[in-house]
Amino acid sequence: MPELYVVTGAGPVGWTVAEQLAGQGKRVRVLTRSGSGPDHALIERMSVDVANPALLEEAFAGAAAVFHCIHGSAYAADAWRRELPRAEEAVLAAAGEAGAVVVFPESLYSYSRPDAVMAEDSPREAQGGKRGVRTALLKARAASPTNTVSVVAGDFFGPRVRNSHAGERIVPAVLAGKRLLVIGSADQPHSFTYVPDLAAAMIRAAQTPALWNRVWHAPTGPAVTQRRLAAAFAEAGGVPAPKMGAVPGWALRAMGLFSGGTRELAEMLYQFERPFVMDSHASEDALGLHPTPLPEAAAATVAWWRAQG
């Protein structure tokens, strides 16, 4: 019988991890509150609240690895502090009992010197807000007796990626020939990670014990500006490159005085007002993986969006 892998969450990362595992002939169990997930003969979908420790023992039984791909109910530091540590604690405890490694997708938020190129050995001590939550989660994983791997990615793009700077904020507008309005600057280099590359890295790390208990970077191509990324989507879609404008930082911060959601977005403006670049070369060597070329990734992204109607 094929090895069993458990995936918590069926967002773009969890869904893609589950599909890639099933494509390898692995048995997959996807846990979500709604019981959703990919439709595949090797994928079992279960309705489970992963923050409830009592439900995880059975769900994790026999698993070789758990891919914990659940995020907060809102893009807000308060929600993250309230929800994420408790869920990760429950998952780590249950996975430890099952003898499974836990693999986490991770962001660049914890890096304390984002003005420099961020590598695997760069300091991760950021404090306050959402950045501080990510730092605390990484420290808790490192302190856990359960084996873990965290795979860091830049901003997501790719099939099924909607709620992202490079998702529904850009791709549909490009394909519709509309003017784009981005935050920060349209012309600062920024690292964007193709979600299938992140999923492949998470799977390879889970299947390679020598890579456990480390923080790795998902294979990520050279940093590009928001303008260049939009142009890549336009080229893939056979449409003209869009006209672009940018919401300046002062305007977004002013709007944040009256809107909690805008305030949370403004907290991360530093990522788009100056270069925000990660280096994944050491991880690529360790994982034996490389990023998908941007034209190929953009074409798959555009094809998915067009298939949604």
Image (spheres, rainbow, N blue to C red):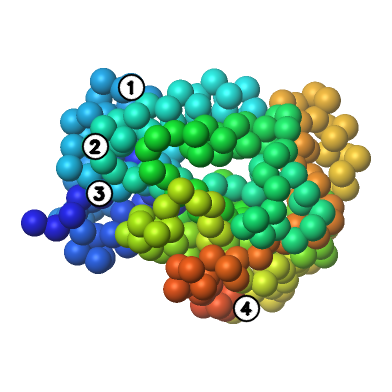
**Residue type (three-letter) at the residue carrying disc 4:** Glu
In three-dimensional space, the C-alpha distance between marks 2 and 4, rounded to whole angstroms, equals 47 Å
Q: Residues within 10 Å of mark 3 (few under 14, many from 20)?
A: some
The residue that mark 4 highlights is 235
Q: Is residue 248 left or right of residue 50?
A: right
Instruction: Find numbered disc 1 in the image and state the secondary structure of the residue it sits on.
Output: loop
**Residue type (three-letter) at the residue carrying disc 3:** Ala
In three-dimensional space, the C-alpha distance between marks 2 and 3, rounded to whole angstroms, equals 8 Å
- Residue 117 coordinates in the image, percent (x, y): 75, 61
Please tell me which of labels 4 and 3 falls first in the chain: 3
In three-dimensional space, the C-alpha distance between marks 1 and 3, rounded to whole angstroms, equals 21 Å
The mark lying in front, picked from 1 and 2, is 2
Residue at 67% x, 72% y is: 222
Which dot marks residue 98? 2
Q: Is the residue under label 2 in contact with that under label 1 (CB below 8 Å)?
A: no
- Residue 138 coordinates in the image, percent (x, y): 56, 39
Which dot marks residue 64? 3
Q: Residues within 10 Å of mark 4 (few under 14, many from 20)?
A: some
Q: Nearer the viewer, residue 199 or 91?
A: 91
The residue that mark 1 highlights is 52
Q: Nearer the viewer, residue 290 or 146?
A: 146
Q: Is the residue under label 1 in contact with that under label 4 (CB below 8 Å)?
A: no
- Residue 300 coordinates in the image, percent (x, y): 47, 71
Residue 1 location, quadrant: bottom left
Q: Is the residue under label 3 in contact with that under label 1 (CB below 8 Å)?
A: no
Please tell me which of labels 1 and 2 falls first in the chain: 1
The mark lying in front, picked from 4 and 3, is 3
Instruction: Find numbered disc 3 in the image and state the secondary structure of the residue it sits on.
Output: strand
Residue at 45% x, 55% y is: 160
